[in-house]
Amino acid sequence: MAGLYFTGNQFLLKGIWAVYLHGHKTASIDDARFFDVGEIATQKTIPWQTSANYNEVSLSDTLLRVLEKNESVAFLIAQNNKLVYEQYWDDYSDSSRSNSFSMAKSITTMLVQCAIQDGFIKSWDQKVVDFIPELKGEYAEELTLRNLSTMTAGLNFNEHYTNPFDITARTYYGPNIWQLMVDEVGATQKPGNYEYQSGATQWLGMVVIKATGQPLSSYASEKLWKPLGAKHPATWHLDSKNGTELSFCCFNSNARDFARFGQLLLQKGNFNGTQILDSNFVEIATSPYAVPYYGHGFWIIDDYNTHIYAMRGILGQYVIVIPKHKLVVVRLGHKRDEKVGVHNKEFLVIVEEMLKQFN
C-alpha cells in the first residue's frame, strides 16, 4: 500500500477502499459516502402531482424480469406532468440518493447553456482556451464547447473502465482533477469526429467553473435545482475537500427529483411556468449531431418511429423522455445488460415496453 502512495498511484488506495473492501467490483450507486461532495441546495419544493390511476399500472412480466435481473432500486413513470407509477427495491425509497454516473454529462451540458443565457459564455462555439488557456495539444486553439458536449473533441483520453491505472480511474479517484486534465488530457486530434470521452465533459464543467467564478454545485443549485423545485438537496462528487466537481459523472439524487430534468426537457426548457432553458437549445441538444445516437450530452434513439432521448449512466441509470406520449421514465439500479449496438439491452426493453403500454 505504501508503494502505491509513494509511486504517485495513491488514487488506487481510494479505489481499493471504496470498491473491493466494500464488496463491489466497480464503482457503486451509493459510493458518495467515500467522496467529498458539493451540496446542490434546494429551496421551495414544487410537489409532483399524482395521476388519478397512480400505481394502478401493471408493468409487463418482460419489463419486471429485466428490472429485477439488473438489481433495480427505483423505477418511475410520469405522464402529462403527473406521477403514474413508482416502484422501489432493497430499502430504497423516493428520497434515496443514487449516483447517476454519466447522467451528469447531460446536467453539465445544461449548465453550460445556463451560463450562455447568463452572459458568462458567448456561445457554444466559443473556444475552450478563452477560459482555460492551459489546455495543451496541437488543436487546443480549435477546440470549442460544442466539441466537448457532442463528444467530437479528439482528446488524449482513453475511455477504459477496467484498467485501474488508466486515465478513467485517475479522473474518478484522483485528488486533483484540474491538474490531471491540464497535464494529461490535451486536444491531440482535430475536433469533429465522434468519440465518447468523459474527459470532454470534465473540461466542459471546468469551463463553467471558470466562466461563472463559482463551484459547479452552487451554480447547479441556483440555475437548475431550485427552479426545478427539487424536494431534496443533491450532491456532486468532488476530487477533494472543497475541491472540483467530477463534472463527467456523479450527481447524486433520487428518482423523483431526477425526473424533474426529464419534465424540463419534455416541456422544451420550461418548468412550472418558468423558462429555465432556451427551447431552441433543448431542440438542438436532444437531436443527433455527429452521429445518429448522440446530441449535446444526450443519447438518442429514433428506431421506433418516434423521437426518444435519454440521460444515461454506466450502471443503467436513465432519465428517458418519449415526447410523443408525454412520458418521462426514470430507472436507477446496480447493474445493466450487455450492449445491443450503442444502447444497452435493458434500455431497449424499457423503451419497447413503455411504447406498448402507453401507445
Image: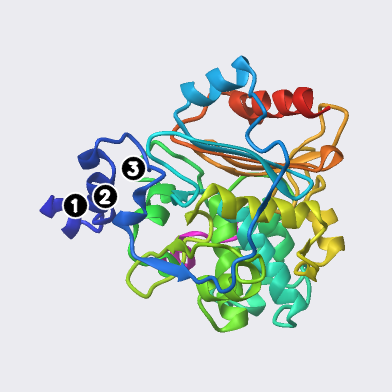
- Ranked by sequence position, the earlier of labels 3 and 2 is 2
Circles 1 and 2 in contact, beta carbons < 8 Å: yes
- Ranked by sequence position, the earlier of labels 1 and 2 is 1
Residue on which the image places disc 1:
4
Range of magenta residues: 180-189
Kind of element beneath mark 3: loop
Neighbor class of circle 3 (other Cα within 10 Å; few <14, some 14-19, many 20+) is some
Q: Residue 76: where, in percent of width, then height?
A: 61, 40
Residue 59, relative to residue 133: is it above or below? above
Disc number lying in front (1 or 2): 2
Residue 85, relative to residue 219: is it above or below? above
Magenta stretch contains residue 187: yes
Kind of element beneath mark 2: helix
- Ranked by sequence position, the earlier of labels 3 and 1 is 1
Q: Residue 312: where, in percent of width, then height?
A: 60, 43
Residue on which the image places disc 3:
164
